[in-house]
Amino acid sequence: GKSSDSTPDSAERAAASDVEAYASLYRSMQLEGVVNWKAFRQAVAGYNRIKEKNKPILTLIDFSKPSTEKRFFVFDMEKKKLLYSSVVAHGRNSGENYATSFSNQYGSYKSSLGFYLTENTYQGGNGYSLILNGLEKGINDKAKARSIVVHGAPYANPSVAASGRLGRSLGCPALPTKLARPIINTIKDGSVMFIYANNPHYLAQSNILHKN
């Protein structure tokens, strides 16, 4: 709690009631067996804290799953619905089938974890693309300068996964070509995106998940 007379008990009670609310949302969206509960819980916690968002849409990319599985999820938080689930590519230096190494640095060709706000779209070298603004200092705040954008790519088409893994990007969350435009149009202009990995280093650093 924020008040000066709050005790750990009241803070703990508030946290427990938050988790109960997330669990009820998770159940009403029927996400069990589809979306990782821990990833969803962190995504919703951050979504609720990010006041600058313009629309009730939340995107979760779950890098605890391999590239051969659906791990890009778009939720309508108002209608409590899962709108899209898709495979998504990670940066080529983040790992083979699993993304395990992350960076905020230029030229790293790695994915970055944490919370983003989507911005505007443009027509670029990879076709229709969506600019991402990384909200976490030292974790993903160079995303825009690194041209980390959502775009479609043939190497992210599910058929490629037959080789053992999806193709990889230079750090962008690249989507299957058919899904890129409808997904980008759903999430553009100020929605929250969260890129998750079961990563203690990120959790220790995230100023959004640690806001009191």
Image (tube, rainbow, N blue to C red):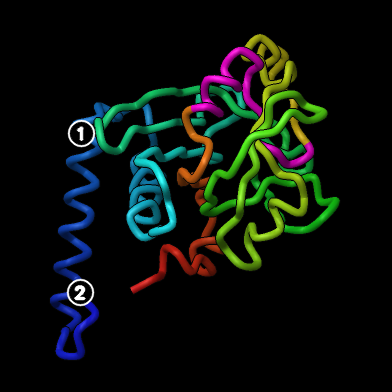
x then y, percent, for residue 122 = 70, 33
Image-quadrant location for residue 75: top left
Question: Tag 1: Cα neighbours inside 10 Å, few (<14), some, or many (≥20)?
Answer: few
- The kind of secondary structure element at disc 2 is helix
- Placement of 10 over or under 96, stated as above or below: below
The numbered mark at residue 11 is 2
Image-quadrant location for residue 2: bottom left
Image quarter where the N terminus lies is bottom left
| Relative horizontal placement of residue 6, taking residue 189 as reference (left or right) | left
Q: For the view shown, which residue lies furthest in the right direction?
A: 107
Closest to the observer: 42 or 146? 146
x then y, percent, for residue 92 = 77, 37
Q: Is residue 174 magenta?
A: yes
Q: Amino acid at mark 1?
A: Arg
- The kind of secondary structure element at disc 1 is helix
Image-quadrant location for residue 119: top right
| Relative horizontal placement of residue 103, taking residue 198 as reference (left or right) | right
Give me the residue at 69% from left, 19% from top. Answer: 164
Q: Amino acid at mark 2?
A: Ala
Q: Which residues are magenta?
A: 170-185
Where is mark 1, residue-wise?
Answer: 27
Q: Which is nearer the N-term, disc 2 or disc 1?
A: 2
Give me the residue at 55% from left, 44% from top. Answer: 118
Give me the residue at 70% from left, 51% from top. Answer: 144
- Placement of 190 over or under 9, stated as above or below: above
- Placement of 86 over or under 110, stated as above or below: above
x then y, percent, for residue 72 = 51, 31
x then y, percent, for residue 63 = 56, 40
